[in-house]
Amino acid sequence: MSGENGQAQKGIGNGTIVAACATFVVAMVGMAYAAVPLYQMFCQVTGYNGTTQRVEQASDVVLDKKIKVRFDANVGNGLPWTFEPVQREIELKIGETVQVAYKAKNISSRETTGQAIFNVTPQQAGAYFNKVQCFCFTETKLKAGEEMEMPVVFFVDPAIVDTVETKNIHTITLSYTFYPHEGPKPVASAADKIVNSTN
């Protein structure tokens, strides 16, 4: 009788271990899927890795100090587009809200959809580069041969002059890379981007 109880307890123990292992595996898979969006959210909130801030309204403080912003445009593998900034660089007052534009053209014979990712260099400036409006917030769809001009509205937060790490920054580069909308969008880097020949 005691042998049967022992076998039953052993069976319950094995079942508990199997259930615990299965739960652990499911949790790890879930964490893997959540890691990318959580990391992106962290970057957007903190400006880490040159990620810009998204804001709802313009700055109400404008300093009598200027900063230069350069614009970079790239197209990733698999997207048959040309992509370039309308202006290569501008100079604006810190806190001043400005609008610039980029141009994209679908050079293929079919409709394609792209999603832009972005970063700012130097990375420390990312937390102070605030976007009010940007084509990168949504996907962009272009018909065969279609060309589109897309605005970006932004300002540089006046708080950039208050920290030791950023107060001496005089030039910021805003870089976009368009990738096909299907599939994951990797972080923009010089290693995996195709620079448009017009740049």
Image (cartoon, grey):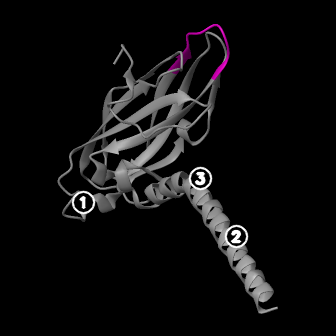
What amino acid type should be assigned to the residue bearing mark 2? Ala
Location of residue 11 with respect to 55 vertically, above or below = below
CA separation, marks 1 and 3?
A: 38 Å
The amino acid marked with disc number 3 is Tyr
The numbered mark, 1 or 2, whose residue comes first in the sequence reads: 2
> Residue at the right extreme?
1
71 or 179, nearer to the observer: 179
Q: Nearer the viewer, residue 84 or 123?
A: 123
Q: Which residue is mark 1?
A: 161
Q: Residue 41, how many percent across, how many down?
A: 51, 57
Q: Is residue 109 magenta?
A: yes
The tag earlier along the polypeptide, 1 or 3, is: 3
Residue 127 position in % (x across, y down): 37, 56
Marks 1 and 2, Cα distance to the nearest angstrom?
A: 55 Å
Q: Which mark is residue 19?
A: 2
* Magenta-colored stretch includes residue 156: no
Real-space CA distance between mark 2 and mark 3, rounded to the nearest whole angstrom: 21 Å
Kind of element beneath mark 3: helix
User: Residue at the bottom extreme?
Assistant: 2
Contact flag, marks 1 and 3 (Cβ < 8 Å): no
Mark 3 packing: few (<14 Cα in 10 Å), some, or many (20+)? few
Extent of the magenta region: 104-112
Which residue is painted at 32% across and 58% down in the image?
Answer: 158
- The kind of secondary structure element at disc 1 is helix
- Side (left or right) of 125 relative to 153: left
Which mark is on residue 33? Answer: 3
Mark 2 and mark 1 in contact (Cβ < 8 Å)? no
Q: Residue at x 18, y 63 (%)?
A: 164
